[in-house]
Structure formats: structure tokens, C-alpha cells
Amino acid sequence: MTPQGNSRHPLIIDALRHGETIKGQCYLGRTDAELTDHGWCQMEDTLQDISISDYDVVITSPLVRCKAFAERWVELQASDTVFLTTDSLIKEYDFGLWDGMTAADIMMHWADELAAFWRSPEQYPPPEGELITEFFQRLQVFLNAQLVSENHRVLLITHGGVIKALTCLNKSKPTSGMFFVEVRHGELHRLVWQRT
């Protein structure tokens, strides 16, 4: 199907944030951390009344806190019509040297840098961290691919930062707007794009 053939059908993305991890409350980006039992239950509870047959594809981040759950959930659904893919474009934002650290730990060593990051993330990324503009660009690449695909309903198993950034892209908000989007562990967010 061509993009033109998709123009009547919006792209619906249901984005599920992973549950609580063994790392607890920290700046968790590229650091791979498994789900706790509670985190696993948070995701299961959210999807308990959702059928995999409602989706054209399930796409997961390659990080274990997303991928392990996605693989198990798809396996339990035993569906032939829906398939699971892994896409590194929907990995979490990379916090560089801060990755895996708590805010208190960061404040001890990089108090000024952390304040600058919160004030202007585009100008002051974490040390050795991902530029926020590049983070948004890679998510735009992901979106562009989905918009020209045959997919109409997509389930993403991903991260809080990804969902916040996708929300900003969906509402044409600046990158700084992601700090005002709340995304809880195990929470599902629906985003709709009209194809033109």
C-alpha cells in the first residue's frame, strides 16, 4: 500500500511505558535494567483487557525492561496475525555519564550542569549524553517510517522519555515541552496522526 492509499486512515500508536525496574528512581536511559515483579504486573494490568488482534504490529525497544515483557506478552497471545519487531529508534534518551544515577547522586557532582539541563536541555545536554534534538530526530525518523507503512494500529512497548517526546511531536510542542508530560510506569498513551 502506498502512503497515498493510507491517507484515509490515521496512524494510531498506543505507547506503553515499561514498569518499575530494579534500578528504582534514577536517570535510566541506555542502562539495561530488568523489571521488578511489580513492574511486570504494572504492564500486565494495563494490557489485561487489550487484544493483540487490535494491532497490525507490536514494536519494542531493544532494552530488556521492554523487550522481555513484549516477547512474553506476544507469546501468550498466540496470534499469527500480529508480529513483534524490535526497533532501536525507540530506545530511551541517553543520559551519558548520568545514566543509571539518581538525581541526588548527580547533584553531588554536577549540580550546575543538572540545573542547566533542566533549564535548557537543547543547549546543555548531560556530559557525554545524547543531544535532545537528536533524540527527537530519531523519533521523527521512526514516525516517518510508520506514516508510510501499511500499519494503522501500532502498539509500542517503550520508555517514558520516548512517550513524552512523541507527545510533543504529535502536538507540535518544543523539545522542552516533554518535561511537562507525565508518563507513569506501566501507563498506556494513545497518539493519533492524520496521514496527508
Image (cartoon, helix red, strand yellow):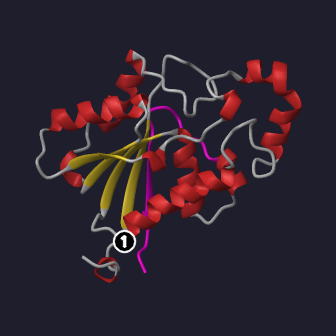
**Mark 1 surroundings within 10 Å by alpha-carbon count, few (fewer than 14), some (14 through 19), many (20 or more):** some
- The answer to which quarter of the image holds residue 26 is top right
- Is residue 177 visible to us here? no
The quadrant the C terminus occupies is bottom left
Q: Tell me where residue 158 appears, x and y as whole percent.
A: 44, 41
Side of 158 relative to 183 (left or right): left
Residue nearest the viewer, comparing 196 with 123: 123
Q: Residue at x 13, y 52 (%)?
A: 81
151, above or below 128, in the image: below
Side of 175 relative to 47 (left or right): right
Q: Tell me where residue 169 appears, x and y as whole percent.
A: 57, 61
**Mark 1 sits on what residue?**
148
Q: Tell me where residue 62 appears, x and y as whole percent.
A: 40, 38
- Looking at the image, which residue sits at the far front? 128
Say what amino acid the circle numbered 1 marks.
Answer: Val
Q: Residue at x 31, y 76 (%)?
A: 6
4, above or below 12, in the image: below
**Residue 186 magenta-drawn?**
yes
Q: Residue at x 49, y 26 (%)?
A: 32
- Is residue 111 visible to us here? yes
How many numbered circles are shown? 1
Q: Tell me where residue 73 appears, x and y as whole percent.
A: 25, 34
Dominant secondary structure, magenta? loop
Q: Residue at x 61, y 38 (%)?
A: 94
Q: Give the SS element for disc 1.
A: loop
The quadrant the N terminus occupies is bottom left
Q: Which residues are magenta?
A: 181-196
**Residue 25 magenta-drawn?**
no
